[in-house]
Amino acid sequence: MTDEVIKHSVHTLVFRSLKRSHDMFLSNQSMLPPIDEKAEKILRGIKARDSYGQVMTTVQKAQAFKQLETKSQPEIPHDTDIAESAALGCDGAMLPASGPSAAPGPVTPTPPRRAAAPRPRWHAPWKLFRVISGHLGWVRCVAVEPGNEWFATGAADRVIKIWDLASGKLKVSLTGHVSTVRGLEVSARHPYLFSCGEDRQVKCWDLEYNKVIRHYHGHLSAVYSLALHPTIDVLVSAGRDATARVWDARSKANVHTLSGHTDTVASLACQAAEPQVITGSHDATVRLWDLAAGKSLCTLTNHKKSVRALALHPALYTFASASPDNIKQWKCPDGRFIQNLSGHNAIVNCLAVNNEGVLASGGDNGSMFLWDWRTGYNFQRLQSAVQPGSMDSEAGIFALAFDRSGSRLLTAEADKTIKIYREDDAASEETHPVNWRPEIIKRRKY
């Protein structure tokens, strides 16, 4: 005779298993040592300081003031009680696991006030002063010489032209590139002009003889950007081969090849302090490089689209990068994010900043925005007018540069002209007031 098998439900079996586990571990749990109240108090104090250290001082002051008003004993509560009362005064705050505690007092301390946004400095509006024509193709780059007497431009007509800054008259034309000239730099220590272009060439021109004296060979594709180191004889160029190359300006030696970007390096900046080289790429990243080691210090990935322009502030240890999503400001040397400058909804090709804290950004649609560097306040918006004979689609700004005094702004544009802007002398703070709304102008921490 076989025994009858009794089938139980899964719920019953799970319940029995849990009960057996509970009975087995119950004896172990009852043998735990007693809780050390002193150790628990220290633990709660550490957790409270870690979670609520920033508001403890405010709560201490509020509770001390309350005690003085009620003429009670002047003893300041323990850190844990302070943290718990601060947490209870905040919506959705969570308390550390500190066991039962006394109920908080009827008066809840007020949270610390949020720092007010700084008021932007007043800047005079800028207006068009002069239009210079002479190139036969898109003007892609502009550079002002250190003496502030002339400036150079490069264009799609493969010619570099040097213009008198005061009169706007053409001084000389330099031919030698066989494709669009994309970058220009004027040396502050030598009578040299450096140029790069889509023909993969980087050239050094002797301006005493107006001829090329050096070529820097190594780029595998078009060279889009050029920068001179301010204190040593080093030239950095970058382009479509996704690298930035560091050259000894005298010996033409390729000192470093800064590789790490995965797409075209469209923008470049050099400075004397660390990090010495900053690059922006179409891979939507900004990289900070150590020039001595030839290695990347850090990569900034906040941008969502290609970074086509960089600008170093001439006095502050900060820089800006431009992308169609936002213009972002960063703090050197670690690339700490400062703030977003939002509103220039275009492909931003270029940036420039002067000593007065005026940041200019130029777009692919001919729009130019002027910002207050410190607060990110957009105080003026300009739309470039195309010249007669040009299509409306040729209203694009490819390069921006302030002269050495910061009082004139030069733009290189798609309608084959160079435009010069100056501040409006007749404007004042009464005629052009600052339309300042601090609830909008705030620093976003992302």
Image (spheres, rainbow, N blue to C red):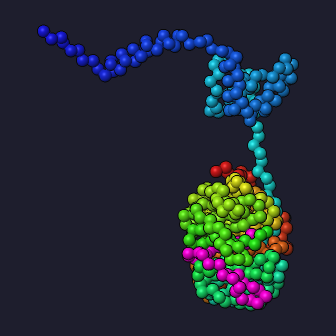
State yes or no: residue 440 in magenta: no
> Residue 302 placed where, x, y %?
61, 55
Q: Is residue 5 left or right of residue 313?
A: left
> Residue 417 placed where, x, y %?
68, 84
Q: Is residue 47 above or below residue 315?
A: above
Report which quarter residue 142 is drawn in.
bottom right
Report which quarter residue 91 is drawn in.
top right
Part of the protein shown in magenta: 203-229
Report which quarter residue 274 is drawn in.
bottom right
The residue at the far left in this view is 1
Tally of marks: 0
Q: Using the image as rendered, state which of residue 432 and residue 84 is in the foreground.
A: 84
> Residue 422 placed where, x, y %?
79, 76
Residue drawn at the location 56% of the way across and 71% of the way down: 241
Residue drawn at the location 81% of the way across and 72% of the way down: 406
Residue drawn at the location 85% of the way across and 20% of the way down: 74
Q: Using the image as rendered, state which of residue 381 and residue 356 is in the foreground.
A: 356
Q: Is residue 344 visible?
A: no
Q: Quadrant of the N terminus?
A: top left
State yes or no: residue 226 in magenta: yes
Q: Is residue 305 above or below residue 142?
A: above
Q: Is residue 366 above or below residue 296?
A: below
> Residue 214 placed where, x, y %?
69, 82
Q: Is residue 401 visible?
A: yes
Q: Using the image as rendered, state which of residue 230 and residue 349 is in the foreground.
A: 230
